[in-house]
Amino acid sequence: MKISIITVVFNNEATIRCAIDSVNSQQYADIEHIIIDGASTDATLALIKANPGRTGIIVSEKDKGIYDAMNKGIQMATGDVIGILNSDDLYYDDRVLADVMKEFGEDNELDILYGDLLYVKSSDTDRIVRNWVSRPYYQRFFENGNVPPHPALFLRRRVYDEAGLFELKFKLTSDYEFMLRIFKKYNFKSKYINRIMVKMRLGGATNKSIANIVKGNIEILKAWKKNELHPPFYLMLVRVVKRLIQFVVKPAE
């Protein structure tokens, strides 16, 4: 089985090579790496072309934002399974994709697989700042403030075929709306594995300012409404508490 990994990038010459190297180092053989560049004006595109490795498709053109670029990559993907690795991120070790595909290979009915994620210092990926440990999905998973870490989420392509792509009207939290949709509105079979899959550098758009945090929370409430779901009154409070816990709990050795 083939896995397609989509990396979206714009003017990120500092870390794009690290993301490419992370994919290239994976022990799983059948990998298609798709890079969607938003017409970068720095050295990003030159670095991509100079370090192709497993990169099968490179697109460089203006887009309508990160989720529009992700949608382009998904539509181009030819893999049986699709994952998204941001240009700031890297896989935890060289066995991540092999372990992911082993799970899909052993269960033809499995649609969604996800694991755990570490937030790390942008300047030092060995410096752990936050430990995002998820848990198996259950009926009130989202109501209790849980959400799978999107970079550690892998989907069989039929999930996108049935549930659709990212909604572009959600500028900061389209990944949250998408996950809310596929878990709560569709009967997809999911599995959680207690394994660190991705290191994510701090500095994402959602959390870079108080204004964006507020906008993101408003979008989250709109995501529930869009999907004709009703969030509990305590949703935002429990989300904050669970995020704070992630700064305290250390990864298992």
Image (cartoon, rainbow, N blue to C red):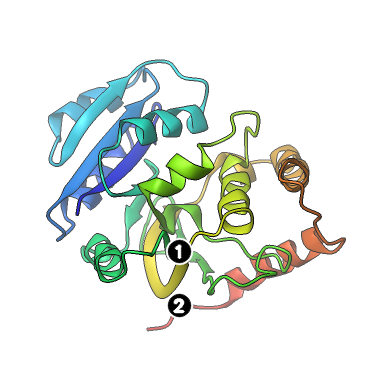
Instruction: Name which of mark 1 and mark 2 comes first in the sequence.
Output: 1
Q: Quadrant location of the N terminus?
A: bottom left
Q: Position of residue 53 (x, y in %)?
A: 12, 40
Q: Are marks 1 and 2 in contact (CB under 8 Å)?
A: yes
* CA neighbours of label 2 inside 10 A, class few (<14), some (14 to 19), many (20+): some
Q: Residue furthest bottom?
A: 253
* 31 horizontally vs 140: left or right: left
Instruction: State the residue at coordinates (73%, 40%).
Output: 226
- Residue, disc 1: 118
Q: Position of residue 82 (x, y in %)?
A: 34, 48
How far apart, in angstroms, are the residues tagged by discs 1 and 2?
Answer: 8 Å
> What is the number of the mark on residue 148?
none
Q: Is any atom of residue 43 visible in this view?
A: no
Foreground residue among 245 and 71: 71
- Residue, disc 2: 251
Foreground residue among 246 and 127: 246
* 246 horizontally vs 34: left or right: right
Instruction: State the residue at coordinates (49%, 27%).
Output: 68
Q: Is any atom of residue 101 visible in this view?
A: yes
Q: Is residue 9 above or below residue 240?
A: above
Instruction: State the residue at coordinates (55%, 59%).
Output: 187
